[in-house]
Image: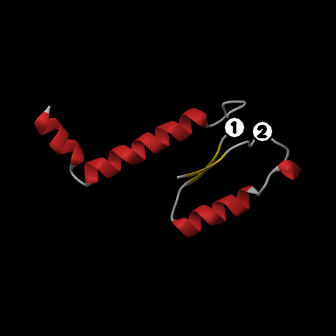
């Protein structure tokens, strides 16, 4: 997941456009999100998305099952 921060800034002050971010994420095979730590816009959604991706990856490689057998 690629997260662009500071979306609360005016478009003219941003380092790259939404389209550039989306294109870059697509090249890398990543999901693209925009967030603002200042306004908290999409921050929770980004963390939930990352946690979900980590959980799915761990589940796919069998780590979750191994942990439940140990615990």
Instruction: Return the mark for residue 36.
Output: 1
Identify the mark nearer the N-term, 1 or 2.
Answer: 2
Q: Residue at x 41, y 42 (%)?
A: 52
Residue lying farthest to the right in this orientation: 12
Colour pattern: secondary structure
Please name the residue shown 71% across and 63% down the image.
20
* Vertical side of 69 occupied by 39: above or below: above
Q: Is residue 35 left or right of residue 26?
A: right
Q: Residue furthest left?
A: 69
CB atoms at circles 1 and 2 under 8 Å apart? yes
The residue located at (55%, 40%) in the rendering is 46
The quadrant holding residue 27 is bottom right
Residue 68: horizontal and vertical position, in percent? 16, 36
Disc sitting over residue 50 in the figure: none
- Give the structural element (helix, strand or loop) at label 2: loop
Q: Tell me the tag on residue 8.
A: 2
Task: Using the numbered discs, state the Cα–Cα distance from disc 1 to disc 2 in whole angstroms.
Answer: 6 Å
Residue name at image x 25 percent, y 54 percent: 61
Q: Residue 45 in the image: state x and y as whole percent.
A: 55, 37
Q: Quadrant of residue 44?
A: top right
Q: Classify 10 Å Cα crowding around label 2: few (below 14), some (14-19), many (20 and above).
A: some
Left or right of 38 in this view: 61 = left
Q: Decide which of 45, 3 is in the foreground and name it.
A: 3
User: Does residue 42 appear left or right of residue 8 in this picture?
Assistant: left
- The image quadrant that residue 23 belongs to is bottom right
Mark 1 is surrounded, within 10 Å at the Cα level, by few (under 14), some (14 to 19) or many (20 or more) other residues, namely: some
Left or right: where 14 falls relative to 5: right
* Location of residue 28 in the rendering, given as x and y in whole percent from the top left corner: 54, 66
Q: Secondary structure at mark 1?
A: loop
């Amino acid at each position: 997941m690629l997260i662009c921060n500071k979306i609360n800034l005016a478009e003219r002050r941003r380092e790259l456009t939404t389209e550039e971010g989306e294109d870059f994420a697509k090249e890398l095979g990543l999901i693209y999100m925009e967030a603002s730590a200042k306004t908290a816009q999409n921050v929770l959604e980004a963390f939930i998305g990352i946690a979900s991706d980590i959980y799915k990856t761990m589940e796919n490689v069998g780590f979750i099952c191994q942990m439940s057998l140990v615990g």
